Amino acid sequence: MRFLMVLCLLLMGASAFADEEAMRDVKTANPFILPHPESQQAAAEAYYAAVEKNVFNGAIPLKHAQLAAISASVAMKCVYCIPAHTAFARAAGATEEEIKTAVAIAADVALNSSMLYGNQFDMETFMKMFE
């Protein structure tokens, strides 16, 4: 319950940030330490700090990282991640059209994956399409 309360507060606070630089100062990972066993929380905190620094504030712009996270969240069907990354994407400047496009990309990948896998499409033939 404490985890959900912290996450809700985090989501409400994230919407207050309008520019990317302000968003980069938000520590999005801290609530995710709580579900870990106490004996592992220091390691989890270090991991999440590294992800925050090197992934979400890394080689691609924050808005794009959050849009990618939305697509991944949709693909995983994570009811926690979708609203969190949507709020973070909006705070980083993503438009509703960009968010809908990120969701559409996840849906398209899932559709094609299901069609190929379900029809047992030959992997060797598939790989030759991308040489």
Image: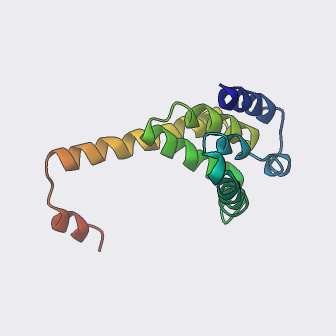
Outermost residue toward the bottom in this view: 131
In this picture, is 127 found above or below 37? Answer: below
Q: Can residue 64 be seen in this view?
A: no
- Residue placed most toward the observer, 34 or 123: 34
Q: How is the image coloured?
A: rainbow
Would residue 76 be found to the left or right of residue 25 on screen? left
Residue sitting at x 70%, y 55%: 42
Residue sitting at x 67%, y 32%: 3
In this picture, is 4 found above or below 31? Answer: above
In this picture, is 129 found above or below 82? Answer: below
Residue sitting at x 65%, y 43%: 32
Q: In which quarter of the image is the C terminus?
A: bottom left
- Residue placed most toward the observer, 99 or 76: 76
Would residue 11 be found to the left or right of residue 22 on screen? left
Would residue 124 be found to the left or right of residue 10 on screen? left
- Residue 115: image x %, image y %? 22, 44
Q: Quadrant of the N terminus?
A: top right
The quarter holding residue 97 reads top right
- Residue 83: image x %, image y %? 61, 31
The quarter holding residue 95 reads top right
In this picture, is 125 found above or below 111? Answer: below
Q: Is residue 21 visible?
A: yes
Residue sitting at x 70%, y 28%: 2
